[in-house]
Each structure stands twice: as structure tokens, then as C-alpha cells.
Amino acid sequence: MKVGIVVFPGSNCDRDIFHVLTDVFDLEAEYFWHEKHLPSKIDAVILPGGFSYGDRLRAGVIAAHSPIISDVKSMAKKGVPVLGICNGFQILVESGLLPGVLLKNTTMNFMCKWINLIVQNNNTPFTNKLKLGQKISIPIANGEGRYFADNKTLKELQEKNQIVFTYEESLNGSSLNIAGVCNESGNVVGMMPHPERAVESEINPTDNKPSSLIFESLLKTAGIEK
Amino acid sequence: MNMPTYWVHVTIENKSGISDPEGETILNDLVLQGKFSSVSKINSAKLLKFQINEKNKKLAKKKIERLCDELRIFNPMVSKLSINIITD
């Protein structure tokens, strides 16, 4: 399985993702600069965290117009698993691949801390090895992580099972405490927390196993059992 | 033929009902602390000033409206725009 990591000017978690995919999970990974095209041989795409274009205008909006996003859109349509983490999630909502929007945290702080997530949907390529209601200890690091959608959209998300992760406790003002959502087909997932910073026991102060299951789910999707 | 130059000001602000923590912080932690107690609300907004060459004011405004829509200069779920031509 080969995973494409999209790199924008200002991405800063691309190497962390590369390390986790290749050194921890023995997957093939390749960086793709945002001006390039994605080859069809890519089996999954990850949009990493960071500050694409310095968050100018609105986090993720300028990157959402990058040439590579049209390839990400067509691959998403074909069912290729796509994961956006933090700024990657912001880019997915700004490109229209995921519903909603990410606003400034109500605290006005850049929030950088370990929190608990609760799994709400274990039927995506990135959560199929997790249990519903499972708790994941994981770090967040964002200033614009407050998920917002209007009531109609929130209702649709609930009805179509598109809420993937919620925060265990109210944290930043997110609607319904949402921390991650997916598209209707479930193959495109966006999440604000950083699983790539939580999968190794050396850097996880609590339990690295649940975060690892996010990447092991991708392996399972590809038919690789670990 | 040289087309006239216009300045088009685009203000992006949250729709009512969408919380604006920046405005609230400026109000609660600066303005009210400074004893300006008659101020009751502050909305923060972003202002973009576009310089554009078009045949006339109407076309200039129309072009900027289309640009804001197509390039998602604002997010219609949470923001609203006001577009004003300032000079010609």
C-alpha cells in the first residue's frame, strides 16, 4: 500500500506522518507538492497538519484551491481513503470535501494539550479497528479548531452517521463537541487531533494503542493485518 | 482605452448568532475594563480592499461579488459580506 502525503507551503506535520507510516507501520509513503498531480497508483491520501499559506484569509482556504486538490477530489469520489489532520481537516472543509467549517476556538487560545476523544463511527477506513464509544488519548494543537455547522447540517451529520469523533468534554466551543467528521461515503475523514503524535509509546504519556488503531484501520482497509 | 480604477472594499463578518470570541474579548477584557460601559457589543471583521480596473462602478462591484463567491473569500455558512465602492 502506498500513501500520498500532500505538502503545502506551511505544512509542518508531513514528516511526522511519513515517519509514522514508514517506520512504525511499514507502509510506503511519498510526498506530493501541492502544485503536482497525484498518480493513480496511490492507495490513500493524507493531508497533514501545519499552517498552509500561514492561515492567510482563513485556515485552509488558499490550499483548498491548490492544483492537487482536484486530484484529491476525484480520488475521493472513487472511494480512495483520504484523511485530513488538523490543517488538513481545515483544507478538506474549505474544499467542500467535508461539510462544516472550523472557526477560532472560543477560548481565543492556541490550544495545545492532551485530550480524550470518543469514537462515534467505526465504519470508516481510519476507524474500522476501533470500538464505538472507545476513548482515545490524543493531543490537539490548533487555534481554529472549533467545528461549526448549521442545525440542518448537524442533523444530516447525525442521521448519516458522519460524526466520527467527539471530544469527551466540551473543549473549544465545537458544535456537538465534534472533533472529526466524514463524508457521506465515509472514505474522507477529517479530524483536528494529531494521531501521528500519539502512536508511539515513547511520546504518549498514557496509552498509545487506541491512536495506533487509526493507522491499523487503514492497513486493514488495504487488506494488511498487523 | 484605459479603464478607470476603483477601490472596492469587502467586509467579512460573522452572521448574527455565530459567536465572535475576538469581538467578545475586546469588549469584555479591554473596553469594559477601561470603563467605557456604554459600549454593549463589538463585532470583529476582516476588511479586504481590492483595486480593480473595470468599465464602470457597477461592473467593478459585480466582478468582486463573483470573485468572492467563486474563490470562497467568505464562508457562507458562517459569514456575510458587505461590498462598497469607495473611490473612482
Image (cartoon, coloured by chain):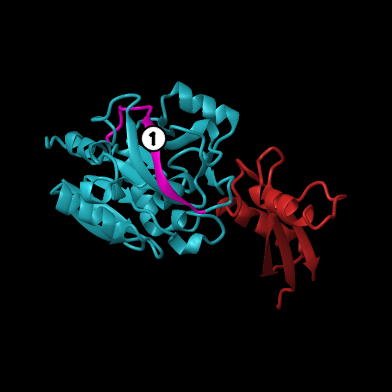
Chain colours: A cyan, B red
Q: Position of residue A58 (x, y in %)?
A: 55, 55
Between B51 and A3, the one lying in front of the other is: A3
Residue at image mark 1: A117
On the rendered structure, is A54 left or right of A85? right
| Any part of residue A42 in sight | no
Q: Compared with residue B84, is residue A98 higher up or lower down, i.e. above or below?
A: above
The total number of labels drawn is 1
User: Residue A166's image quarter?
Assistant: top left
Q: Which residues are magenta?
A: A110-125
In the displayed structure, A130 sits above or below B6; it is: above
Residue at x 43%, y 42% (from the top left corner): A97
* Residue A100 lies in the magenta stretch: no
Q: Chain of mark 1?
A: A
Q: Quadrant of the N terminus of chain A?
A: top left
Q: What residue type is disc 1 on?
A: Leu
Q: Residue furthest top?
A: A159
Q: Can you say which quadrant of the picture contains the C terminus of chain A? A: top left
Counting from the top left corner in percent of width and height, residue B19 is at 66, 42
Give the side of residue A9 with respect to residue A152, left or right: left
- In the rendered structure, the answer to whether residue A98 lies left or right of residue B20 reads left
The residue at the point 41 percent across, 25 percent down is: A161
Q: Residue A40: where, in percent of width, then height?
A: 23, 49
Closest to the observer: A69 or A13?
A13
Q: Residue B10 versus residue A121: which sits nearer the camera? A: A121
Residue at the (69%, 66%) spot, across then down: B49
From the top left corner, tell me how far across and down residue A200 is, in percent: 22, 47
Instruction: Tell me if residue B85 comes above or below residue A123 in the rendering.
Output: below
Local crowd size for mark 1, using a 10 Å CA cut-off: few (<14), some (14–19), many (≥20):
many
Q: Which element is circle 1 on?
A: strand
